[in-house]
Amino acid sequence: MQKIYISDLAKYVGQEITIQGWLYNKRSSGKLRFLVLRDGSGYLQCVYFKGNVTPEVFDLCDKIGQESAIEVTGKVKAEPRAVGGYELDATHLNVLHETHDYPITPKDHGIEFLMDNRHLWLRSSRQVAIMKIRHRIVKAIRDFFDNKGFTLMDAPILTPAACEGTSTLFETEYFDLGKAYLTQSGQLYAEAGALALGKVYTFGPTFRAEKSKTRRHLTEFWMVEPEVAFADLNDDMDLAEEFLEYIVQSVLTDRAEELKTLERDTTKLQCVKRPFPRISYDEAVEILKKNGVEFEYGNDLGAADETIVSNQFDRPVMVHRYPSEVKAFYMKRDPENPKLALAVDVLAPEGYGEIIGGSQREDDFDLLLSRIKEHNLPQAAFEWYLDLRRFGSVPHAGFGLGLERTVTWICGLDHLRETIPFPRMIYRNTP
Ligand code: 4AD
Ligand code: MG
């Protein structure tokens, strides 16, 4: 018998086939047993009619529990009313692993219980949909940069120094060489890459010892970081908006079914088209004041502030030129106002907040060195980075997009924890 996947059913209408998978759900009615099978590629209702199968098979239908591993055989029928549009007129059932008392049932479970059982929770239709969208986003990210002539150049995970401030570093002993830190960002290495290859991106896990217990912070998350030589802040913003449009439109085109499973309002995503609004930090502060927020000029925007600002727009908004005090040491100052950094944060609509942080980099040796000193960073650990300003220094810019925040927004979820297979947060590092 031909073994196929549910996603290929369309090619087998009227034929006898076999599918291996797990029992997702079942119900019975008189002489009929309905087994819903899932195989990772989709869902299929298998109909067992008492007159068509042996008594043993019919009894097995009653006996096996949710998540039993099974092999079904039968004839494929087009059935517009069924999940996926097909149904199996089943003739055989082979039980590969009989399961009873699967802990996650169709009833409601508390979030802590689900998180403790994340390894099983991943099998639910909602989690499968999120993982498929995450994968599609990863592919869009890679395709976008690959098609534009960027080279993927991965950065190390174990690093000798901080990139995004010293307060969120995970530290470990590194043999005789003292301390090493889990990377917060691949950016500094991406800069070396941009000066070698012109246009590069890093894409990997990054780590922040975030003590905050919020819905948008993980301690381990994935970040993609493009870096471009001979680029300024405007080029950086052009790249970011083209990139986000491409990601969102790719998911809309290829993952419509999964967005439906998540009941995502896709009209909101359809708006994500260039050009995106670009406002300065000063203009963002004006918006906050008009909305009655007591905001102290010079502070960074908090989550609540970002929501108010982004709610003014139907697509992502780019906020540029933040006070340099609240931004990282490597950002170039605005020549027209040295109190401002040539930074940009992209805020997602619908209250999702910052998904991208980027900037033009300080390319002047003396200025960069004085920043390193001002920030009390260990100069020795940054000598290699300073070399990039000693030899062939050019204007360059880049940004980092947080994968999980992007998945959260596109899927319309209210917490980051469902967007990564095994989330790491301040109070959770299992399973
Ligand atoms: O704004 P951040 O800190 O920027 C950087 O790390 C730069 N070095 C990037 C660059 O210019 N190459 O982080 C970038 C993005 C944020 O906008 C957010 O989407 C995500 O990374 N992010 C987090 N996501 C989940 N949990 C956390 N704790 C995150 N911290 C940052
Ligand atoms: Mg940021």
Image (cartoon, rainbow, N blue to C red):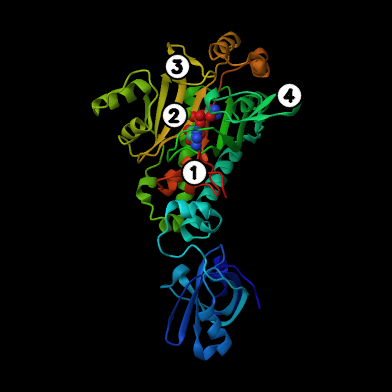
Q: Nearer the viewer, mark 1 or mark 3?
A: 3
Secondary structure category for the residue under label 1: helix
Of 394 and 53, nearer the camera is: 53
At x 55%, y 65%, the residue is 7
Q: How many marks?
A: 4
Task: List x then y, in percent, for residue 256.
Answer: 44, 56
Q: Is residue 290 above or below residue 121?
A: above
Of 309 and 25, nearer the camera is: 25
Q: Quadrant of residue 196?
A: top right
Q: Nearer the viewer, mark 2 or mark 1?
A: 2
- Disc 2 residue lies near ligand 2 with CB under 8 A: yes
- Disc 3 residue lies near ligand 2 with CB under 8 A: no
Residue at image mark 4: 177
Q: What mark, if any, has residue 321 been given in the picture?
A: none
Residue at image mark 2: 345
Task: List x then y, in percent, for residue 358.
Answer: 50, 27
Q: Amino acid at mark 2?
A: Asp
Of 368 and 17, nearer the camera is: 368
Residue at image mark 3: 325
> First in sequence: mark 4 or mark 3?
4
Label 4 to label 3: alpha-carbon separation: 32 Å
Q: Amino acid at mark 3?
A: Glu
State left or right for residue 312 relative to residue 3: left
Locate the N terminus by quadrant: bottom right
Q: Amino acid at mark 4?
A: Leu
Q: Nearer the viewer, mark 2 or mark 3?
A: 3
Q: Is residue 218 visible?
A: yes
> First in sequence: mark 1 or mark 3?
1
Label 1 to label 3: alpha-carbon separation: 32 Å
